[in-house]
């Protein structure tokens, strides 16, 4: 029996790669589609299980409303994900955090990690939006191309 070691919530507007990240971590080969309701996934690791909550929503206010309903639960880490090819998705993270403070108490988790996704596309096009607005540690990944060993560090 695996004990849940960590609980992680994934926040970001639609299309940034949250569900793709979850599918890659879970080893699912299916192509993800738009997330219409919160998805709770359990990832089994050698040192315990990690629960991942994939919050739906296409726009910042919608994501914040869904997240506010779920945030009554405690999470160890919030992964704030944006698309490194689209600055608006980074600014939306700031909106989501502000909105959470309106709909509920502000985000209360042990750790916050900003994740810039689609690094592979940024390298191909020679353009990348780096996190310059949120004060949290930032990692840059490609949920489609990076090996699972690198991606697992996002949720550990």
Image (cartoon, rainbow, N blue to C red):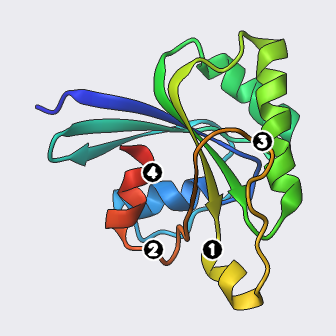
Toward which corner of the image does residue 25 lie, by quadrant? bottom left
Q: Residues within 10 Å of mark 3 (few under 14, many from 20)?
A: many
Check if mark 4's residue and mark 2's residue have beta carbons within 8 Å.
Answer: no
Give the residue drawn at x 61%, y 80%: 120
What x and y, as percent, mark residue 102? 84, 14
Q: Residues within 10 Å of mark 1 (few under 14, many from 20)?
A: many
Give the residue drawn at x 76%, y 73%: 128
Which residue has dot 2 on it? 146
Ranked by sequence position, the earlier of labels 3 and 1 is 3
What x and y, as percent, mark residue 35? 66, 49
Dot label at residue 93: 3
The C terminus: image quadrant: top left
Check if mark 3's residue and mark 1's residue have beta carbons within 8 Å.
Answer: no
Check if mark 1's residue and mark 2's residue have beta carbons within 8 Å.
Answer: yes
Check if mark 2's residue and mark 3's residue have beta carbons within 8 Å.
Answer: no
Ranked by sequence position, the earlier of labels 1 and 2 is 1
- Spot the residue most to the left: 1
Check if mark 1's residue and mark 4's residue have beta carbons within 8 Å.
Answer: no
Ranked by sequence position, the earlier of labels 2 and 3 is 3
Dot label at residue 154: 4
Give the residue drawn at x 41%, y 30%: 7
As helix, strand or loop, the secondary structure at mark 4 comes to helix
């Amino acid at each position: 029996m695996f004990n849940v070691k960590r609980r992680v919530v994934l926040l970001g507007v639609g299309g940034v790669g949250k569900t793709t990240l979850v599918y890659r971590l879970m080893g699912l080969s299916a192509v993800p589609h738009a997330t219409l309701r919160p998805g709770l996934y359990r990832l089994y690791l050698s040192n315990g299980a990690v629960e991942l909550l994939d919050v739906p929503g296409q726009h910042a206010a919608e994501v914040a409303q869904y997240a506010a309903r779920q945030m009554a639960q405690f999470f160890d880490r919030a992964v704030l994900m944006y698309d490194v090819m689209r600055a608006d998705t980074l600014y939306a993270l700031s909106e989501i955090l502000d909105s959470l403070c309106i709909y509920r108490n502000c985000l209360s988790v042990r750790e916050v990690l900003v994740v810039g996704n689609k690094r592979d596309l940024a390298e191909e096009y020679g353009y990348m939006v780096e996190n310059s607005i949120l004060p949290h540690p930032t990692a840059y990944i490609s949920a489609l191309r990076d090996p699972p060993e690198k991606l697992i560090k996002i949720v550990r």
